Amino acid sequence: MRLIAGIFAFALCAVPALGADVLTSEGLGPVKIGMSHAEVEKAAGTKLKLPKPEPGGNCATAKIPGGKGTFMFFDRRLVRIDIRQPGVTTAEGAAVGMTENELRKIYGKKAEFTPHRYGEGPGDHYVDVKLGKDRLLIFETMKQRVESFRIGTQEAAQLVEGCS
């Protein structure tokens, strides 16, 4: 029995610091929008591979530990968090794989639907939800299903192609 308890305790210690898996207007678990690159590494409990920005550019991205998305930095400050895999929800419960109707139920009139820039059909949208003064949550849907979502400063969240 002690062996099983020991194995369980070890497994809990091996869980990444981002185990909360809830994206809020502030950030993802202990990682908060506005933190420096070093602060994000400390909060996440891991080193992030942050490429050097292109000459003349100040934007770079790093994979979130566990591979569920990316952190976007501008001038080495976290400005946006992108989620592309199931397993992370918003504070309200929205997630990759949900339908547009489910988003409407969760966010109501706060959700603003606009045609997707690269969409090919009527069920391809950006769904913007303003969260406070300088936070924007954007869902990208294809065939009326959430493919990804991101939260960040208004300016960073609106960059369709990230740092590109």
Image: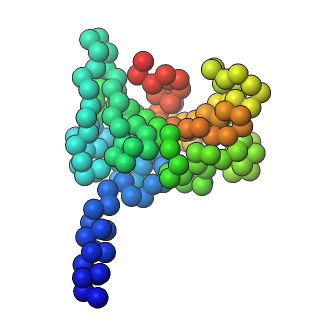
Relative to the observer, which residue lies in front, 157 or 46?
Answer: 46
| Rendered-image quadrant of the C terminus | top left
Percent across and percent down for residue 138 are: 58, 35
Q: Quadrant of residue 17?
A: bottom left
Q: Quadrant of residue 129?
A: top right
Q: Residue furthest top?
A: 56
Percent across and percent down for residue 114 are: 70, 27
Residue at position x 69%, y 51% from top? 106
Q: Is residue 55 left or right of residue 141?
A: left
Residue at position x 70%, y 29% from top? 124
- The reply to whether residue 132 is in sight is yes
Residue at position x 68%, y 30% from top? 125
Residue at position x 60%, y 54% from top? 92
Vertical position of residue 96 compared to residue 51: above or below: below
| Rendered-image quadrant of the N terminus | bottom left
Q: Is residue 53 left or right of residue 130?
A: left
- The reply to whether residue 107 is in sight is no
Q: Residue furthest bottom?
A: 1
- Picture colour scheme: rainbow
Q: How many marks?
A: 0
Q: Quadrant of residue 70?
A: top left
Relative to the observer, which residue lies in front, 49 or 53?
Answer: 49
Percent across and percent down for residue 99 are: 70, 45
Percent across and percent down for residue 76 are: 28, 30
Vertical position of residue 46 compared to residue 59: above or below: below
